Amino acid sequence: MTQTSVSEIARGVFLTHLHAVQAHLDGCIEGKDPIHLHDLRVANRRTRTALVEFKFLFPQETLVGYQKSFRWIHQITGEVRDLDVGLGHFPIYQQQIPKTWRTHLEPLRTLLESKREVAQGELVKKLRSERLARTLSSWSVLLESDLLDGSTLSLEPAKEYGCRRIAKRYQRMRKKGGKLKKNTPAEAFHNYRITIKKLRYLMEFFRPVVDNEKFATLRTGLKAVQDAFGAFQDAEVQAINLRSLAGELHQLGVSTDTVLALGQLLGTLEKMQRQSKKSCIKQVRWITADATARAFQSCFQYPVEP
């Protein structure tokens, strides 16, 4: 029986996420449902991760060119996505302060909506640009060609390669997790979240050839850890953005009550950060546990050193 090669897995991953970007492009241009932009960014992010994981399949100049192109897509979609998140969190913001203060947050909603309208207009121009059309078209042509089949590793059996990569990535993540403490700087927590995400993506890339009864359990466990770290980062990013927005609102001459309401909200977000950090430490115990290490070793049939 013919084994699936690394290049076959890579091509399938890239095509899946290219189709996702294409499917959500019109919805992003229309700009009415934030899920389209969210899903486009997820597909783009996974493409960028896959370019790193499968970089040996590309000529260096080609790799660098597409890394720049997909990084550009990430950059141009960031502002609208951040504003969508802010507007989506607004009802939660209101719940975080006493009822008598909630109406004083309305200038914040108005500012977010105004900024999003402007940012959406700029985004539409870029999504309709020749640069984006050329990027997606040339990427599609490349994936249908035999370019990915030309390297030494391209024909390596995907299962053996994927299991080896996943086990080694988990082993490094396990060691890093043991160093996270309550007084560890926030940046280290954010970097660790990215490490978790990349491992989960890597597992999903190779799922067609490595799936077994333990795979889903390990993937679910990783998702729970990632969610905990995501909540910590989310609280920090919200607090940073809110301080910036508070400065803009102050310059616009909002009432003292609005400034005080924003101060209460910031205090709540800082408390959420502290609580989320504790949750991260708790979740990391699952990553570093011997039982989890044994499960990874059993699932991917590759040794995990202590």
Image (cartoon, rainbow, N blue to C red):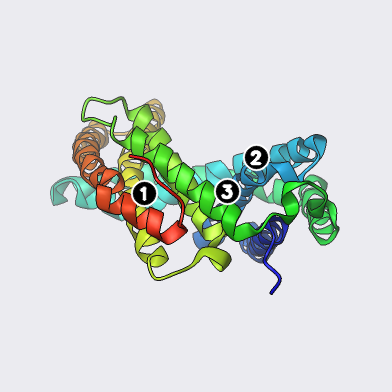
Task: Give the alpha-carbon distance from disc 1 to disc 3, as whole Å.
Answer: 15 Å
| Camera-nearest residue between 179 and 84 | 179
User: Upstream in the sequence, badge 2 or badge 3?
Assistant: 3
Which numbered dot is residue 71? 2
On-image quarter of the N terminus = bottom right
Instruction: Please tell me which residue is depicted at 32% across the width and 53% down the height of the picture.
Output: 294
Q: Does residue 253 appear in this view?
A: no
Outermost residue, bottom side: 1
Q: Which residue is mark 3?
A: 45
Which numbered dot is residue 226? 1
| Percent of width and height locating residue 251 | 40, 26
Above or below 203: residue 183:
above
Q: Which amino acid type corresponds to the residue marked 2 in the rendered image?
A: Arg
Answer left or right for 175 relative to 2.
Answer: left
Label 3 secondary element: helix
Task: Give the alpha-carbon distance from disc 2 to disc 3, as whole Å.
Answer: 9 Å
Instruction: Please tell me which residue is depicted at 52% across the width and 59% down the height of the picture.
Output: 204
Check whether the beta carbons of the residues at disc 2 and disc 3 lie within 8 A of each other. no
Q: Which amino acid type corresponds to the residue marked 3 in the rendered image?
A: Arg
Q: Which amino acid type corresponds to the residue marked 1 in the rendered image?
A: Gln
| Percent of width and height locating residue 121 | 64, 48
Check whether the beta carbons of the residues at disc 1 and disc 3 lie within 8 A of each other. no
Instruction: Please tell me which residue is depicted at 42% across the width and 48% down the height of the picture.
Output: 303
Q: To which quarter of the image does residue 62 belong?
A: top right
Q: To which quarter of the image does residue 266 belong?
A: top left
